[in-house]
Image (cartoon, rainbow, N blue to C red):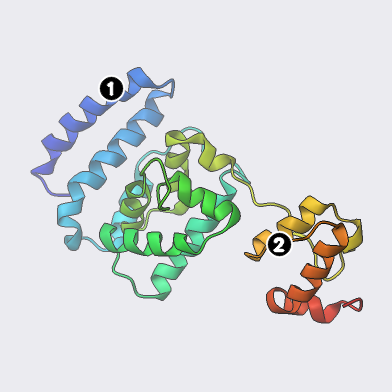
Amino acid sequence: MYPEDGPTIQSEVCRRLSSEAAETHESSLSVFSSAFTDVLLTLLEPKMFSFSGLSVALAIVLVPGPVESLKEGDCEVCVTFLGKFYDTLKDSNTNFNSADIEKQLLESCKDTKGKDNRFCYYIGATSDAATKMINEVSKPLSYHVPVEKICEKLKKKDSQICELRYDKQLDLTKVDLKKLKVKDLKKILEEWGESCKGCAEKSDFIRKITELMPKYAPAAAKARTDL
């Protein structure tokens, strides 16, 4: 921390505390944590090159967190998607700055489907998104803030983000396709990015799935004896 930042942080936190406390019903500790973290990230950004990712992440972790942390299973899609995305950034040696991370996030969201695509839509990372909250992801990730903490904050911005849950995956090696409903058969094709044009009967969808299974689920196709 730079000495000259002290008075700035103090005054800015006080200003945000007064406004956020009036708008929310959170405890004073939770409001303080949110305000302090926002100000710290904003003021440190111009000086980010003086800090390692580890030291900044440590500073953020040491800030008192919200009273209610995420429970097991909360924000499933958010935590899972951002966790994989963060690992991808590390593996690809991406520069950890907001601009590069935002660029990579937009690129990653282009290929998403299902609940992952819906998550990207909510944070404004798709072309048809109505709102833009990408900076709420890119900025904290640039400081290596844990994805759980990022999802906690996104939940306050838009509760729909943490209501997303992945559908229970079918075991295609064992499931009896004939016993599934048509909507479930359609969902399998949708997850593969496929459709069944001209399909009118349940048997049409089953035939389409069995034709495509070697391409999209080769292990399941080899394990089945009815294909």
What kind of element bears circle 2? loop
Residue 62 appears in the picture as rendered: yes
Q: Is residue 193 above or below residue 35?
A: below
Can you give x and y, in whole percent of width and height, for residue 141 in the image?
A: 36, 56
Please tell me whether mark 1 or mark 2 is closer to you in this view: 2
Q: Is residue 163 positioned above or below 84 on the image? A: above
What residue is drawn where x is 34% and y is 17%?
22
Residue 162 image-quadrant placement: top right
**Residue placed under numbered mark 2 in the picture:** 197
Front in this rendered view, residue 60 or 115: 115
Q: Position of residue 149 (x, y in %)?
A: 44, 46
Q: Residue furthest top?
A: 22
Residue 37 position (above or below residue 184): above
| Residue visible at 38% across and 24% down in the picture | 28
Classify 10 Å Cα crowding around label 1: few (below 14), some (14-19), many (20 and above).
few
The spot of residue 215 in percent (x, y) is 69, 78
For the C terminus, which image quadrant?
bottom right
Q: Is residue 184 left or right of residue 72?
A: right
**Which numbered tag is attached to residue 19?**
1
Q: Residues within 10 Å of mark 2 (few under 14, many from 20)?
A: few
Q: In the rendering, at what x and y percent does residue 87 appear?
A: 46, 67
Which residue type carries mark 2?
A: Lys
Q: Is residue 70 visible?
A: no
Q: Kindly identify the amino acid type of the residue bearing the numbered disc 1.
A: Ser
Q: Is residue 65 above or below residue 60?
A: above
